[in-house]
Structure formats: structure tokens, C-alpha cells
Image: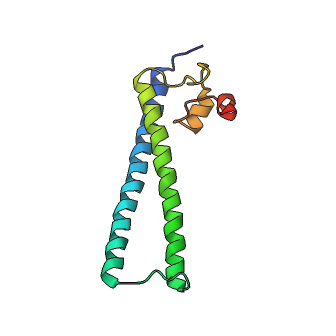
Amino acid sequence: MARQLAASTLKRLGKRLEEERVRLERIISEHDEAREDVRLAEGSADRNADPDNVDGGAIAVALEMDLTMVQNARDLLIRVRHAQDRMEKGLYGTCEITGQPIPIARLEALPYATTTVEAANRI
């Protein structure tokens, strides 16, 4: 059964979604800029990526960790935008699988949640 969230709740959660969207886009943008800087620096320094080289190995590990963090940010950004889209369509706060209301506590914890915990566990 669908329920309407109070306007103040929608506004508060909408603001949190927007703040999260901006934060994630900033992380992704900064990563893309830093990655380009590294690429340019590597090209101009003409270094070999020798895995036996301690510096090269440390750089490779750091880049791998950074890529994982950015991929997580990209995935979360998709979820945030999806939740914002549902909010615009008047569907926010309703489980997209069962149609049941998503508890406010869940939305407060994860404003981008689009399913109840029970439905998410079935996926």
C-alpha cells in the first residue's frame, strides 16, 4: 500500500539526496582529473610500470584502491539519481518491488533506498 510522505520529510530527504549527489560527483570528477594528471606525468617521465619496483608496486596498489572507491561512488551515484527520479515521479518511499511503504528509519539511514529490507534481501 502506497503512502505519502510528509512534505517536510520529502524536502529533508530530497536535500540529503542532492547533497550526496553533489559529493559523489565531486569525488568522481576529482578522481578523473587526478587520473589524467598521473597519466600525463607518467608519459612525460617515461617510467616503466615495473611490478618489482617498490614505488611502482605501491602506485599500482594505490591506483587499484582508488579505482575501487570511484567505482563504488559511480554505483552509488546511479542509486541516488534513481531515488531522485522516483521522488520527482511521486514514487519515493514506496518499495519498487512490493509496493509497500519503505520505513522512514530506512530512508533516514539510506535516503537512496528504493526497496524495503525484506525485498532487498530477496534480490
Q: Quadrant of residue 118?
A: top right
Please determine whether, in this image, residue 94 is positioned above or below residue 57.
above
Please determine whether, in this image, residue 33 is positioned above or below residue 89.
below
Task: Determine whether, in the image, residue 70 is placed left or right of residue 41.
Answer: right
Tell me the quadrant of the picture where the C terminus can be found.
top right
Please say which color scheme the image uses: rainbow
Front one among 17 and 120: 120
Picture residue at 48% right of the left edge, 21% below the top: 91
> What is the x, y in percent for residue 77?
45, 44
Task: Determine whether, in the image, residue 91 is placed left or right of residue 122.
Answer: left
> What is the x, y in percent for residue 111?
52, 35
Picture residue at 35% right of the left edge, 72% below the top: 39
> What is the x, y in percent for residue 65?
54, 65
Tell me the quadrant of the picture where the N terminus can be found.
top right
> What is the x, y in percent for residue 33?
34, 63
- How many discs mark residues in the rendered view? 0
Front one among 5 and 37: 37
Picture residue at 42% right of the left edge, 49% below the top: 23
Residue furthest to the bottom in view is 53
Q: Quadrant of residue 43?
A: bottom left
Front one among 60 and 24: 60
Q: Quadrant of residue 96?
A: top right
Task: Determine whether, in the image, residue 76 is placed left or right of residue 40.
Answer: right
